[in-house]
Amino acid sequence: MKIAGSVALVTGANRGLGRAFTRALVERGARTVYAGARDPGTVTDPGVVPIELDITDPDQVAEVARRLDDVDLLVNNAGVSRAASFLTAESLDPARAEIETNYFGTLSLSRAFAPVLARNGGGALVNMLSVLSFMTVPRVGSYSASKAAAWSLTNALRLELAAQGTLVVGVHAGFIDTDMAAGVQLTKIAPADVAAQTFDAVEAELYEVLVDHYSRDAKAALSADPEVLYPALRR
């Protein structure tokens, strides 16, 4: 599909990567760009339409899908990380919060907007995933699990929505230069670069985007023995 003339909804659009997505859509000539955020007052960029949206609230999701009946491009970007491991977290609350947003929230939006996309010719659905969909790191184990679930969801959605002509794109990245990765002392990719690669893929009708060497290397290692991805396991 073409970005120019499209009607897009981006979740988690008030900062970081979500903001980069909305800016790229405006620059590429999207007809309408809806910017979803829990607090729409934090959406300040010109050319976008702020929308109050908490993707963990089923009633609000249903209402937004009813109102935004012209959307033909959905970008599921909203996500959370609690930086918790499975065994040292004080409770299961971090894991529940990540699954609730990163998996169930993405599922909820996708279910709500699938018929909207169908009525508008199929369009495209983009899920923002992670290199941690492919692998894990102990200190963010529960976040990795939520992103692995979202990757599996993306593959299933791709199959289920093919019949209605909806392109489903999964975007994987290592470290993006946003608040979420502020404490990471490794090479990071600019949010604008992620947005550019994502919408290039939408227009080229590609199913998957591996935006950096972290995601490309991890995907390539999936067919290898676990010790390749996890050198600590080597004996």
Image (tube, rainbow, N blue to C red):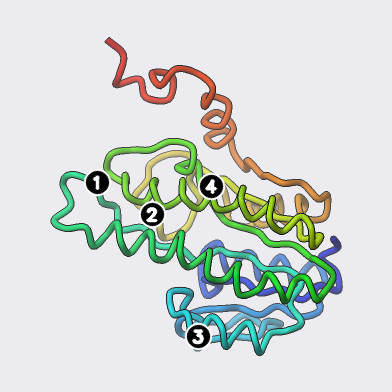
Quadrant location of the N terminus? bottom right
The residue under label 1 is 85
Quadrant location of the C terminus? top left
Of residues 121 and 43, the one drawn nearer to the viewer in this rendering: 121
Q: Is residue 148 above or below residue 49?
A: above
Query: Which secondary structure, mark 2?
Result: loop
Label 3 and label 1: CA atoms lie apart by 31 Å
Query: Which secondary structure, mark 3?
Result: helix
Label 4 and label 1: CA atoms lie apart by 21 Å
Q: Earlier in the sequence, mark 2 or mark 3?
A: 3
The residue under label 2 is 182
Inspect the image, locate mark 2, and give the three-letter code of the amino acid beneath it.
Answer: Ala
Query: Which secondary structure, mark 4?
Result: helix
Crowding at label 4, few (<14), some or many (≥20) Cα neighbours within 10 Å?
Answer: few
Q: Do residues under tags 3 and 1 come within 8 Å of each other at their CB atoms? A: no
The residue under label 3 is 60
Q: Earlier in the sequence, mark 4 or mark 1?
A: 1
Q: Position of residue 231 (x, y in %)?
A: 35, 20
Q: Is residue 133 above or below residue 6?
A: above
Foreground label between 4 and 1? 4
Q: Earlier in the sequence, mark 1 or mark 2?
A: 1
Residue at x 59% of width, y 85% of height: 64
Where is residue 230, by image quadrant? top left
